[in-house]
Amino acid sequence: MQAPVVRLSNGSSESRVMREPKKLVERSADMLIAGYYLSRCGRRDNGRPAGPPEALGVESWTAAYDFFYDAMGDGRTLSQFRNSLKNTRDTFDHLFDNGRVGWINQDGKQPSIRNNFARINEEWKDRSDSELESFLLRLQTGSVAVGTEENPFPRARTEGGLKVYLSRRRERDPRLRADAIAIHGLECMGCRFNFERAYGLIGKDFIEVHHAMPLSEAGTRETDPRTDLIVLCANCHRIVHRGRRVCLSLAELRGHLRKGLSTTSQT
């Protein structure tokens, strides 16, 4: 096929190759639910437009979109994913009192949602925010999947085969672990759990050590066990890393614990 000739303002001409437009990735049901959740459950603050939901442990909308990227990226670049999830959130915005207007058409009106967007709203509009949040966070970590008509129920799956993995790991100094335990003790700094108190002798001297700034982000550096390392039980350690692109601080972890205890005491 011959390349088209483009006439320039100076009278000359050049040939330009027409590029195929990039194929758009269809939004998955997971992404639609994530956008619905972000629109409905955002954090209210002094009458300003809602910020990201508190459960995500992030301050900016960009970080909120990134929270779901690993689980829902579907081959998009990070920039493409951010735009797509933001547009999904905006599509639902006019349904909720979140301080944002959402999409407006050429007539200055908010268009009604249709198709899969309408289906998600119908499925979740009468269910509680806490149920939606719990489902979405499990969806993000892969512990639950959106069902399909073909496979509505869990089924037995084969596992246990051998695979060989070649990977890179950040170097760690085992002496820092011992130093951190000597400084901070053996009680979880998040929830105060102590393995020896709970399990007896088998739990003696056991605790996990966590880098407050993950080595994957900080790279090679000097690590001070007094300020850069904290001790956590296995549960709290998993929670601070639950968001694949977000690592909770100790203060944020304790905030979630207080919120959880407060909710439990009210039920």
Image (cartoon, grey):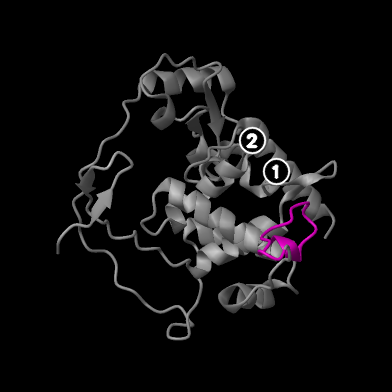
Local SS, label 2: loop
Q: Quadrant of residue 258?
A: top right
- Crowdedness near tag 1: few (<14), some (14–19) or many (≥20) residues, C-alpha within 10 Å: some
Q: Check the image and report above or below for 263 versus 204.
A: below
Depth check: 161 or 9 in front? Answer: 9
Marks counted in the figure total 2
| Residue at x-position 39% and y-position 31% | 216
| Residue at x-position 26% and y-position 36% | 168
Seen in the image, is 256 located left or right of residue 227? right
Q: Amino acid at mark 1?
A: Leu
Which residue range is magenta in the image? Answer: 93-107
| Residue at x-position 22% and y-position 46% | 13
Q: Check the image and report above or below for 105 versus 80.
A: below
Position of the C terminus by quadrant: bottom right
Q: Earlier in the sequence, mark 1 or mark 2?
A: 2
| Residue at x-position 70% and y-position 43% | 257
Res. 257 mark: 1
Seen in the image, is 178 located left or right of residue 249? left
Res. 101 in view? yes
Q: CA distance from mark 1 to mark 2?
A: 8 Å
- The residue at which mark 2 appears reads as 190
Depth check: 9 or 196 in front? Answer: 9
The dominant secondary structure in magenta is loop
Q: Are marks 1 and 2 in contact (CB under 8 Å)?
A: yes
